[in-house]
Image (cartoon, helix red, strand yellow):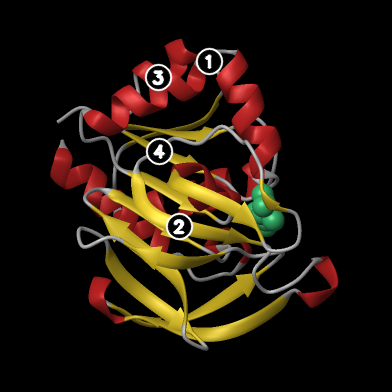
């Protein structure tokens, strides 16, 4: 089997941390392949899996819309490509997002995850925190969640699997091959979520 081709969307946000977490997860699982930063529709077209990092969802969305990447990611999702979206990445994957303080605002979204998101649901930068959560449904009983200006999921459609909650707020979801988390798995030493994402990529291949 040829190696897998994993891209980290490199528009803005914690790109480098995701490159290294994905690379380490691949090495530990003994999966052959490459992990690279991707930006253009052409680079995205060749991928077997994509990670959309945390950062600022309005910036990542707007720049990806302008250069045509958003459309290409939508096509790839429709063809079954697994995607891991963390924090701003989950916001981008959603169908609907509003900000806790600012309210409704037009922002480009991938319109896939059947969820309604509240951005900055836990407050602003100063309210960032870490918490022990469980992702039992995907075989990860304990995980340290790093929440930075984190969103939460207010509502999830029937086809969405809720993977984790914190104080009744949904913080991790899965729909088909797409995973979204409110927290930043790339900012911990624990590679289990990146590993799980890679197993989805392998199954698809
Ligand atoms: N609050 C940011 C947004 O709405 C997301 C924060 C993050 O990715 N750490 O885009």
Dot 4: within a 10 Å radius of its alpha carbon, few (fewer than 14), some, or many (20 or more) residues?
some
Q: Position of residue 193 (x, y in %)?
A: 40, 63
Q: Which residue is disc 4 drawn over?
A: 111
* Sequence-first tag of 1 and 4: 1
Q: Nearer the viewer, residue 158 or 28?
A: 158
Looking at the rendered structure, the secondary structure element under dot 1 is loop
Residue 127: percent from the left, percent from the top? 78, 76
Crowding near pointer 3: few (<14 within 10 Å), some, many (20+)? some
Mark pair 3, 2: CA separation: 23 Å
Which residue is situated farthest in the right direction here?
126
Q: Quadrant of the rendered structure where residue 37 is? A: top right
Q: What is the spatial separation of the Cα atoms under label 2 and label 4, in whole angstroms?
A: 10 Å
Which one is earlier in the sequence, the residue at label 3 or at label 2?
3
| Separation of marks 3 and 1 at Cα, in angstroms | 9 Å
Task: Tell me the CA gap for discs 4 and 3.
Answer: 13 Å
Give the mark nearer the N terminus: 4 vs 3: 3
Locate the C terminus and report the quarter of the image it occupies.
Answer: top left
Q: Residues within 10 Å of mark 1 (few under 14, many from 20)?
A: some
Whichever of labels 3 and 1 marks the residue nearer the N terminus, that label is 1
Query: Residue 72 — which label?
Result: 3
Marking on residue 116: 2
Q: Which mark is residue 115?
A: none
Label ID, residue 40: 1
């Amino acid at each position: 089997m040829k190696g897998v081709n994993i891209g980290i969307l490199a528009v803005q946000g914690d790109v480098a941390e995701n490159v290294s977490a994905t690379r380490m997860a691949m090495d530990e699982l003994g999966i052959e392949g490459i992990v690279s930063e991707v930006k253009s529709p052409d680079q995205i077209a060749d991928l077997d899996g994509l990670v959309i990092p945390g950062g600022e969802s309005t910036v990542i969305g707007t720049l990806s819309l302008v250069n045509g990447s958003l459309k290409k990611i939508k096509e790839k999702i429709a063809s079954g490509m697994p995607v891991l979206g963390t924090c701003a990445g989950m916001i981008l994957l959603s169908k609907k997002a509003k900000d806790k303080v600012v309210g409704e605002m037009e922002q480009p979204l991938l319109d896939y995850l059947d969820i309604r998101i509240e951005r900055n649901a836990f407050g602003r930068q100063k309210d960032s925190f870490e918490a022990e959560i469980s992702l039992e449904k995907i075989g990860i009983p304990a995980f340290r969640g790093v929440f930075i200006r984190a969103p939460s999921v207010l509502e999830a459609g029937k086809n969405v699997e809720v993977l984790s909650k914190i104080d009744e707020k949904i913080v991790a979801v899965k729909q088909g091959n797409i995973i979204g988390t409110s927290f930043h798995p790339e900012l911990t030493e624990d590679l289990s979520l990146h590993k799980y994402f890679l197993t989805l990529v392998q199954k698809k291949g």
